[in-house]
Amino acid sequence: MTYFQKLLLIGFLVLFVIVIIEGIFYIRRKPTPVIEKTGLVKEKLKEIEITDWKIYRNEEYGFEIKYPKDWYVETEISPPLGTKLSVSFENYPPGEGIEKEDYQLIVFTIEERSIAQWLEKGREAEAKIEEFTVGSEKGYKATIPQVGISAVVAKNKYLYSLMITFPTIEGKKIFDQMLSTLRFLEK
């Protein structure tokens, strides 16, 4: 990942946070959304075939996730903003621009971020929040209209966050399919 791409990523993350903060003022006048138990129904996801998808596996942080076979993966260890690991799944070659969708899986330590903090920001941004599970771990997926989708789940001392900003309809389906393949490794 080039210096320019890192700055661009940081810029998008800052923009995402600004949108959430702007939503705070608006949401304080609205009731807190109800968390729905939807569980990412796999029947809805059958439109996308994943049998030939590749698997990204990280032994150090104990997880794996599938992604489309013709996509590119970039990994950054100890990236900026206090994260432990940032993995980008991109449907375009590195350095070819930002106009296409970029999916990020970011690992935080629980001390840096908690699910409670994440839920509070989602509520402040009037996100539609849904529950899902990875193995026996409960996670939450927030959809913020015209902004993006983010999902978090905690396991041991880490918080795993998968996100996409400004997704297309197809991008939302791919996001849900990728999220449904996330699994934790036995140690």
Image (cartoon, rainbow, N blue to C red):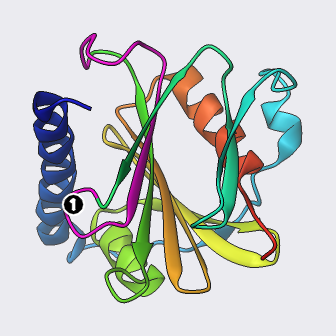
**With respect to residue 155, does 146 lie above or below?**
above
Count of numbered circles on the image:
1
Question: In the picture provided, is 124 more to the left or to the right than 33?
Answer: left
Rendered residue at 26%/56% (across/down):
79
Secondary structure mostly seen in the magenta stretch: loop
According to the picture, the residue beneath numbered tag 1 turns out to be 20
Magenta stretch: includes residue 170: no
Q: Quadrant of residue 102?
A: top left
Magenta stretch: includes residue 94: yes
Q: Secondary structure at mark 1?
A: helix
Question: In the picture provided, is 30 more to the left or to the right than 28?
Answer: right
Q: Quadrant of residue 30?
A: bottom left
Q: Locate the N terminus and report the quarter of the image it occupies.
A: top left
**With respect to residue 67, does 38 lie above or below?**
below
**With respect to residue 42, does 21 lie above or below?**
below
Q: Position of residue 9 (x, y in %)?
A: 21, 40
In front: 19, or 97?
Answer: 97
Magenta range is 79-98
Q: Position of residue 5 (x, y in %)?
A: 18, 30
Q: Position of residue 58 (x, y in %)?
A: 62, 55
